Image: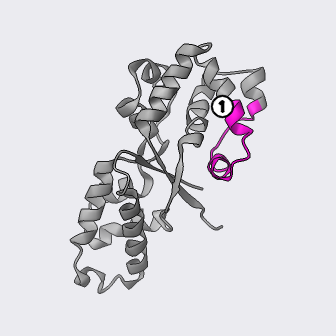
């Protein structure tokens, strides 16, 4: 099965401020639901390319039988209009498994390939009221974003790689080249976070 990996840049401050403003203006978090339904119906190709990779309930269920767990889905859907497409890692699984062969600590290779927890994104950038709504519902394992610090650290580690590291790992040359290009592109927007989904 072919792995699909896509990536976007997101302004986390603007997104979370707008999310909180919408919650205050409307009927609490049900305002998120109403907006998420509108986003779901958008034909915009950037929005569609993102939504088709998200594991979501049927939006009909959001309207007919909303559950607390839907809140996390609405949060993720509402990111869609704020996303700017960017380069994606072609082989995140190889990065996770094989970058330690080049001297990367396994935890750093995992973070680069899979990203941070989604709950950490909310905790880092959302107002306290939004975090309070989301934190009881966001299960661990929902990863997929990198902070500017992660991007800078990854680029620096790649710049320090010596050619000798590839002597017995020639197959990793294109993987590292792709990863470097992805991070270099992401670094051009230091006020944004890198968001990726691999299916």
- 119 w.r.t. 193: above or below: above
| Residue lying at 24% horizontally and 64% vertically, measured from the top left | 156
Q: In this view, does 113 lie to the left or right of 31?
A: left
**Residues shaded magenta:** 36-59
Residue 90 x/y as whole percent: 51, 68
Q: In which quarter of the image is the N terminus?
A: bottom right
Report if residue 55 lies within the magenta region. yes
Residue 101 x/y as whole percent: 31, 72
- 91 w.r.t. 137: above or below: below
Residue 153 x/y as whole percent: 26, 57
| Residue lying at 78% horizontally and 30% vertically, measured from the top left | 60
Of 138 and 177, the residue lying toward us:
177
Q: How many labels does the image show?
A: 1
- 143 w.r.t. 92: above or below: above
Look at the numbered disc 1 and give the secondary structure of its residue. Answer: helix
Q: Is residue 127 left or right of residue 83?
A: left
Q: Name the residue under label 1.
A: 36
């Amino acid at each position: 099965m072919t792995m699909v990996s896509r990536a976007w840049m997101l302004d986390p401050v603007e997104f979370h401020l707008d999310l909180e403003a919408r919650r205050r203006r409307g009927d609490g978090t049900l305002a998120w639901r109403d907006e998420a339904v509108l986003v779901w119906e958008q034909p915009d190709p950037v929005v569609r390319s993102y939504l088709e990779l998200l594991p979501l309930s049927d939006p009909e269920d959001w309207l007919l039988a909303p559950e607390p767990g839907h809140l996390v889905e609405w949060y993720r859907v509402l990111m869609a209009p704020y996303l700017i497409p960017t380069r994606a890692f072609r082989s995140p699984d190889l990065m996770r498994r094989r970058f330690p062969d080049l001297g990367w600590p396994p935890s750093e290779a995992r973070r680069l390939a899979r990203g941070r927890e989604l709950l950490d994104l909310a905790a880092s950038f959302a107002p306290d009221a939004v975090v309070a709504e989301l934190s009881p519902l966001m299960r661990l394992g929902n990863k997929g974003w990198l902070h500017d610090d992660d991007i800078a650290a990854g680029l620096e580690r790649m710049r320090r790689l010596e050619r000798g590291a590839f002597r017995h790992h020639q197959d990793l040359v294109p993987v590292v080249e792709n990863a470097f290009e992805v991070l270099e592109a992401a670094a051009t927007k230091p006020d944004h976070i890198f968001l990726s989904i691999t299916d």
